Amino acid sequence: MWTKRPKEVEPSQFKEGRIDLPVESAIWLQHFKMQNSELLQELDLKTSKSYTWSKREVTEQGASLMDIVEHVRFKIMVLVDGVNAFWNKTNVKRPDKTLVPPQEITITRAFLKLLQNDWNNSVILTSVDVIPFNRNAKMNDPYTPRALLGKEGFECMDPFIPIQIENYTDKEMHSVLEYYIDRLWIQSEQGRSEEGRDQIKFLSGSNPLQVMKLCEPL
């Protein structure tokens, strides 16, 4: 997550007091373009107004812009993993060494706008994580939406439909391990064996996060 270990931090040229993460922003835009390139080329999206990104960068009306979609042109699904990171403390520092709140980071503000409930013909699906974005969190901490999102995050997301994700069933565990093996995330013969799979299941308790962690060094 870019709020924890950013490669580069710069003051925003667009809004005084905000912070830009140019490397992380560029990486995300490249990822977005790669994942959606065929669809975006087919739709040939154009901007409906001019956008000023900085003092020297302006996108004029009618230009092709890969990450802006036209109003109700097609169905949209927004997916955000670990959305509670947007309301947790960051490791991003200003020149005076003070920590930057996530809402003052330009790319975070852009994502928070995506989470607003003013979409049409669209759906927003997010997940909340217990450990990755809270250094003091423990696996036995409360994992209700209110506890994980905090007051500000809960109010920002409300109204929403919470869905509790249980531990893997035997069938889901089999499918996940098959996927990890197929994608070469599990490369050792021991990890691919039936005995190895049983050990992963036992040690992880079929918890999705623990399964992923156990499979990382395999």
Image (spheres, rainbow, N blue to C red):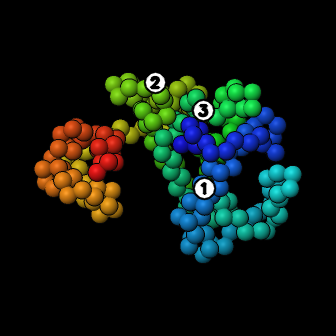
User: Could you give the CA–CA distance between mark 2 and mark 1, rounded to whole angstroms?
Assistant: 28 Å
Labelled disc at residue 98: none
Residue type pointed to by label 2 = Asn
Residue type pointed to by label 3 = Asn
Give SS at disc 2.
loop
User: Which residue is label 2 attached to?
Assistant: 136
Q: Inspect this view and state whether residue 71 appears.
A: no
Q: Residue at x 21, y 44 (%)?
A: 200
Labelled disc at residue 27: 1
Q: Quadrant of residue 1?
A: top right
Q: Is residue 145 left or right of residue 45?
A: left
Q: Residue furthest right?
A: 55
Q: Is residue 159 left or right of residue 68?
A: left
Disc 3 or 1, which lies upstream in sequence? 1
User: Which residue is label 3 attached to?
Assistant: 91
User: Could you give the CA–CA distance between mark 2 and mark 3, rounded to whole angstroms?
Assistant: 14 Å
